[in-house]
Amino acid sequence: MTTKAHTTNFIKNRIDADVAAGKNGGQVVTRFPPEPNGYLHIGHAKSICLNFTTAVDYSGVCHLRMDDTNPLNEKDEYIDAIQRDVQWLGFEWGKHVYFASDYYQQLYDIAVHLIKEGKAFVCSLSADQMRETRGTLTEPGTPSPDRDRSVEDNLDFFARMRADEFEEGQYILRAKIDMAAPNMNLRDPALYRIRKVSHHRTGDAWCIYPMYDYAHALSDAIEGITHSLCTLEFQDHRPLYDWIVEHSGLSAKPQQIEFSRLNLNYTITSKRKLKQLVDSGAVSGWNDPRMPTISGVRRRGYPAKAIRSFCEHIGVSKQDSIIDFSILENHVRDVLNVEALRRMAVLDPIKVIITNYPEDETNTLSVPNHPQDEIQGRRDLTFSRELYIDREDFSDDPPPKYMRLTPEKEVRLMNAYAIKVVEVIKDADGQVQTLHCTYDADTLGGQKPKDGRKIKGVIHWVSAYDAVDAEVRVYERLFNVENPASLDDFMEGLNPDALRVISHAKVEPAVASADAGQAFQFNRIGYFCTDSEEHQADKPVFNRIVSLKEGW
Ligand code: ATP
Ligand code: MG
């Protein structure tokens, strides 16, 4: 039974046909196979969403498989981060978490089987010699001098490779396919190489490690994956994938289907390059809120739901394209606009003294948390004689159509009263320091003034009585060039202004006391969240998630 909750695409059309034909008994099993050599990024989110939602749509399962066959760069820290990120995105693998390294013995046994079948041989060519004898797109390769070694000798050499009798690079196990194949991947590709390094899970049990193409195809077959969805660069590897599965002796026949990678402008989606940013100190870590990693955008405050809807929206195809970063930001806004509670914060405060309000008095205003959604409840705000407003909400030399406070023009304080200026106090540099104002007690919460005068502007404010000092981190794009990957050195494209720290913002108490990692709309300013690492109620730290509208 298919229950298609999500939109259709060319992959689902293929699966529909397979299910209808009764292939794999109508079952659908997909997998997400990251290599634990770094943190997941927004590109991986596309693959995660695709694999997990496809499984759900066909009442199947999606495996999480660590493709840990290259021990050099892999770490347990990355495994933990990958699991956390996939879960945070909202997907469950249940008991189906696997490690390619758990198959090492089986992969070895299959290699022995291939040797016995005359489908693999031990080769003494160096990596350079292999490259030189591979031929070109127009010329066939030259067979290895070891290609016709006897099965007995191959078995003996391979056993000795495994027994640590040789040096790295001295021997390699190769498939015996076709040195004249038009597809270069079929020209006797390497299956196993000697690597004298410890593996983070198998320790020193192995000194030979399987190549990616070999381990990946067989892991799929071992797990009974029915549809192996991968990115387009593996299209030319598919004939090798099929060859390996076919000759493995395993019964499963997974179908590899390729789709285009997610590329975003102003962004890098390569673990290797992202690691370079981390290692060089250009960012504070993998979860720096400027990073396009899943952990980075989580700390930045992007809701998981927005990433899922973005991935759903961009869909899958075989066409390579670059997606505009603002599309992702719009999904973030759409979710936050509905879900984020409204709060007031003043980023660049100037003091306002309400001269006709008693000095030792305050009053409590009950205001909605969300203007369109009563279910989100209300909170109390304190109104007092001294307040803060944002510097840019006052001007004594206003441009045309300025709708905020001026010496001539009254404004409403959001959720509170109308005020008008009686005196502007400046410092020696001519900077406004304090505004003396009066308020109209009859205008609370948007009530019309008794004398019928019109008040148009509305500005936000916080009470000096209970406002909390806060640090606000305003983020811009990490790169200021559209395609940083195209630069000789992508680090040259880093945006030096990607982080601006505002250290003396004032926020209302209800937001200072929020738990870490909570998102809010600061009225009229943008969406912000409490930083998951550094926020404290008495020392609040906020990250700007995204501006209110495109182009801040
Ligand atoms: P990177 O180049 O960042 O290391 P990778 O493809 O080598 O990426 P893997 O850990 O092997 O990283 O990726 C796991 C899965 O995620 C693969 O199936 C891969 O095709 C997919 N994937 C990686 N990057 C993207 C992307 N930008 N868009 C869609 N899928 C991706
Ligand atoms: Mg990879």
Image: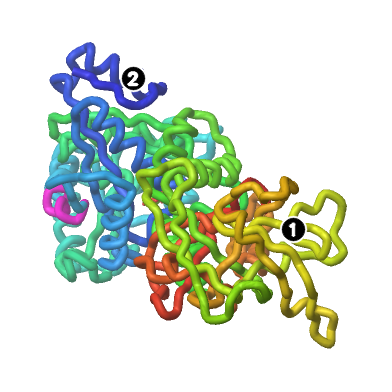
Position of residue 324 relative to residue 73, above or below, is above
Q: Quadrant of residue 185?
A: top left
Q: Which residues are magenta?
A: 100-107
In x, y percent, where is residue 322? Answer: 59, 40
Position of residue 319 relative to residue 368, above or below, is above
Q: Residue at x 37, y 48 (%)?
A: 376
In x, y percent, where is residue 220? Answer: 22, 39
91 sits to left or right of 547: left
Identify the mark nearer the N-term, 2 or 1. Answer: 2
Residue matched to label 1: 410
Q: Is residue 211 visible?
A: no
75 sits to left or right of 139: left
Q: What crowding class fits label 2: few (fewer than 14 Cα within 10 Å), some (14-19), or many (20 or more)?
A: few
* Mark 1 residue type: Glu
Position of residue 227 relative to residue 414, above or below, is above
In x, y percent, where is residue 135? Answer: 50, 41
Can you say which quadrant of the picture contains the N terminus?
A: top left
State whether the magenta stretch is mostly helix, strand or loop: helix
* Mark 2 residue type: Arg
What element does badge 1 sit on?
A: loop
Disc number at residue 22? Answer: none
